[in-house]
Amino acid sequence: MSDSLLIIITSIILLLIVLLLVYFLQRNTEITLKEDTLVLTKSFRGQVGINLEEELKHWSTQQLRLILWRGTIYGITMKFRSGRQLNITSRFNQETYQQLAQLLEFKFQDRKIPGGQAF
């Protein structure tokens, strides 16, 4: 009886680990910039290209201070003409975040909403 119980518990634990991995990989997105196009590569859904010149409606920056990590995370929120909204933080995408922030400040300054204002 104890051997079958051990097999069942091990199977449940392995199933939970697989489900967590699938959930993480599904939400994990790689972000790259190619000139004025933001390319989002999702694990199971392929690539999506967003032309910022045509589709970007508004953007803003945020600053979040985290006590647990004793640091500051910066974020960019972009709203597109289609109604979609995209948030990019410096926590996991530090290099891409810097490139995107420079591009938005340089080319799309007129579409920036001052911090603290809602879309």
Image (cartoon, rainbow, N blue to C red):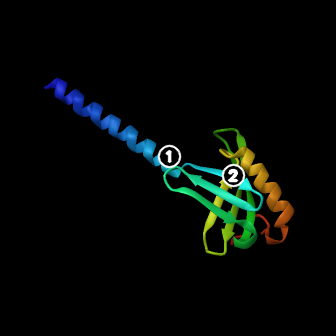
Q: Are marks 2 and 1 in contact (CB under 8 Å)?
A: no
State the residue at coordinates (67%, 55%): 88
Which residue is label 2 attached to? 32
Q: Is residue 31 left or right of residue 18?
A: right
Q: Quadrant of the N terminus?
A: top left
Q: Position of residue 3 (x, y in %)?
A: 18, 24
Q: Is residue 8 visible?
A: yes
Q: Is residue 108 left or right of residue 89?
A: right
Amino acid type, mark 1 = Leu
Residue 116 appears in view? no
Give the residue pinned by disc 1: 25
Q: Residues within 10 Å of mark 1 (few under 14, many from 20)?
A: few
Quadrant hosting residue 86 = bottom right
Query: Is residue 33 toward the left or the right of residue 102 in the image?
Result: left
Density class for disc 2 (Cα within 10 Å; few <14, some 14-19, many ≥20) is: some
Say which of 46 and 75 sits in front.
Answer: 46
User: Which residue sits furthest left?
Assistant: 1
| Quarter the C terminus occupies | bottom right
> Which kind of residue does numbered mark 2 sit on?
Thr
Percent of width and height locating residue 48 = 60, 60
Q: Earlier in the sequence, mark 2 or mark 1?
A: 1
Mark-to-mark CA distance, 2 and 1:
17 Å
Q: Between residue 65 and residue 54, name the one nearer to us.
A: 54
Up the image or down, 97 lies above or below 77; here it is above
Instruction: Kindly identify the residue that appears in the image at 80 percent across and 61 percent down.
Output: 104
Q: Does residue 39 sit above or below 110 in this rendering?
A: above
